């Protein structure tokens, strides 16, 4: 029998400490399932959240004895390896094994599935849609990759919600399923927010990467809807209408004005809607979310009413501290397209202020010499541009050493400041002149524990 959110009661999660996996564990526990899990390392906030629910493994590591015939299913996260002892034991016993996307699909077979895909913007678009639906008290389930304000979990699975909103990651589903996650959800409404080559360790060429989005686009079913950024050249290559049975909807940046550092949307009725986010990339995200919400029955005026209270997704262009003549923001941006969009938007929003921007190279792609040239001229907007990376991360990812000159050459910016020591980076930032200047910190990491709160306090005092 196909599983539903209530039909599987005894579940074990391999790699339960992952960002999305621990949220799935909590969601399943909340609806009454017996949940166990394992991982070889669990960090905060997953550790505390699992502990509070009584789901934190007694020991870190892999324990095949946890995998017993009594389990209804095993869910395996991407962090696990194909030779994981618990996974091998589950295969030996012939247990039902799911990847995260497989399980989400099976749990939402009877729902309308909205899947937000794209190299950038998908978390923000998903967050926008969830915010609007919640504001108007609509019933919905969801799976999203970031902690959202007003939502205690990143996953919700229920029996009665008629729709589910899913952030559709293009990365692989599991160590034993090499299909991209967003191919498994089988969307009714799909979004492609933009395509910019990433995950070089899995998709070695730009063509390989783009092909995954072409497959996603062509999976749109009869009577389905595909919503896409009409100005993205890579997206244009994969969203060519191939059937009259699918509705294709292109979008661009929402019409707007900027007044004294604040962005105001202009509606078709020439009404003005103040918003709390900024930048062309966010104006495109808003347009995408508006088109999805329209398909779900949300009228324009109701969308704008909810949007006015949207503060943005966590870690996406997030205000850390504001002073009288300076602001400090942090952003999850790390890929070339995200870096360029965020830095350019920030400079345009505060054109009279000097911009100091720092990027941490933290992912496999961003540290790979074969991929680095993709960053050429993506960091031109800041007045002072800084790149930081930890040489130990290179060693861990088995990548060659990265000379500062090679980084400057890749970015095509000779005045680029390159640091490999977080204390030296902090000292450099402390010495900057912060009168009429802003600081933007961009990373999917933490700059190796740099105290951003203290730094922001000094910048804005």
Image: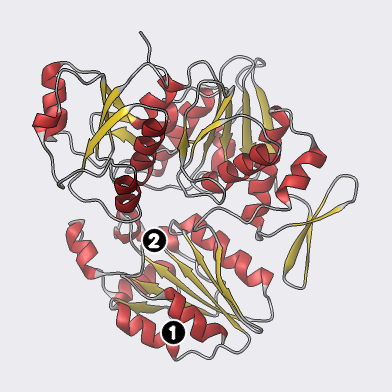
Question: Circle 2 — which element?
Answer: helix
Q: Which of marks 2 and 1 is in front?
A: 1
Which residue is under mark 2? 373
Camera sees residue 229: no
Q: Position of 338 compared to 202: left or right? A: right
Q: State which quarter of the image contains the N terminus.
A: top left
* Residue occupying image coordinates x 51% and y 55%: 314
Category of crowding for the residue at label 2, using alpha-carbon neighbours closer than 10 angstroms: few (below 14), some (14–19), many (at least 20): some
Does residue 360 sit above or below 148 in this rendering?
below
In the rendered image, the residue lying farthest to the right is 269
Q: In this view, does 415 lie to the left or right of 129?
A: left
Residue 180 at x, y = what percent?
38, 32
Q: Earlier in the sequence, mark 2 or mark 1?
A: 2
Task: Tell me what residue is drawn at x 57 percent, y 48 percent.
Answer: 150
- Determine the residue positioned at 49% across, 28% down: 216
Q: Mark 1 points at which residue?
A: 429
Q: Position of residue 173 (x, y in %)?
A: 33, 33
């Amino acid at each position: 029998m196909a599983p539903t959110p209530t039909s599987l009661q005894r579940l074990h999660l391999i790699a339960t400490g992952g960002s999305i996996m621990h949220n799935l564990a909590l969601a399943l526990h909340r609806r009454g399932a017996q949940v166990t899990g394992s991982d070889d390392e669990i960090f905060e906030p997953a550790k505390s959240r699992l502990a509070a629910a009584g789901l934190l493994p007694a020991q870190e590591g892999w324990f095949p004895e946890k995998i017993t015939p009594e389990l209804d299913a095993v869910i395996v996260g991407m962090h696990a390896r194909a030779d994981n002892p618990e996974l091998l034991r589950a295969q030996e016993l012939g247990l039902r094994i799911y990847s995260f996307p497989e399980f989400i699909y099976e749990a939402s077979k009877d729902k309308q599935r909205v899947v937000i895909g794209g190299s950038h913007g998908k978390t923000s678009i998903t967050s926008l849609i969830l915010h609007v639906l919640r504001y108007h008290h609509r019933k919905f389930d969801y799976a999203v990759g970031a902690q959202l304000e007003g939502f205690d979990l990143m996953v919700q699975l229920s029996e009665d919600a008629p729709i589910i909103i899913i952030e559709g990651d293009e990365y692989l589903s599991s160590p034993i399923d090499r299909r991209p996650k967003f191919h498994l959800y089988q969307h009714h409404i799909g979004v492609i927010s933009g395509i910019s080559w990433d995950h070089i360790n899995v998709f070695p060429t730009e063509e390989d990467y783009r092909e995954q989005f072409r497959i996603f686009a062509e999976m749109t079913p009869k009577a389905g809807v595909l919503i896409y950024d009409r100005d993205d050249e890579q997206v244009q290559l994969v969203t060519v209408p191939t059937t009259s049975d699918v509705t294709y909807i292109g979008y661009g940046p929402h019409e707007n004005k900027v007044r004294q550092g604040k962005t105001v949307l202009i509606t078709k009725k020439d009404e003005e809607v103040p918003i709390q986010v900024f930048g062309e990339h966010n104006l495109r995200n808003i347009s995408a979310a508006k088109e999805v919400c329209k398909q779900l029955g949300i009228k324009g005026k109701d969308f704008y009413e909810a949007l006015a209270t949207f503060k943005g997704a966590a870690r996406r262009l997030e205000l850390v501290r504001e002073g009288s003549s300076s602001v400090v923001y942090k952003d999850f941006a790390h890929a070339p397209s995200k870096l360029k969009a965020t830095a350019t938007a920030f400079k345009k929003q505060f054109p009279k202020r000097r911009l100091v921007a720092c990027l941490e190279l933290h992912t496999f792609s961003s540290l790979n010499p074969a991929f680095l040239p993709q960053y050429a001229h993506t960091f031109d907007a800041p007045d002072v541009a800084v790149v930081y990376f930890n040489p130990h991360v290179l060693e861990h990812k088995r990548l060659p050493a990265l000379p500062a000159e090679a980084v400057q050459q890749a970015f095509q910016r000779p005045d680029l400041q390159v640091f490999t020591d977080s204390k030296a980076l902090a000292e450099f930032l402390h010495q900057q002149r912060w009168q009429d200047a802003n600081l933007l910190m961009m990373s999917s990491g933490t700059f190796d524990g740099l105290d951003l709160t203290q730094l922001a306090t000094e910048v804005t005092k």
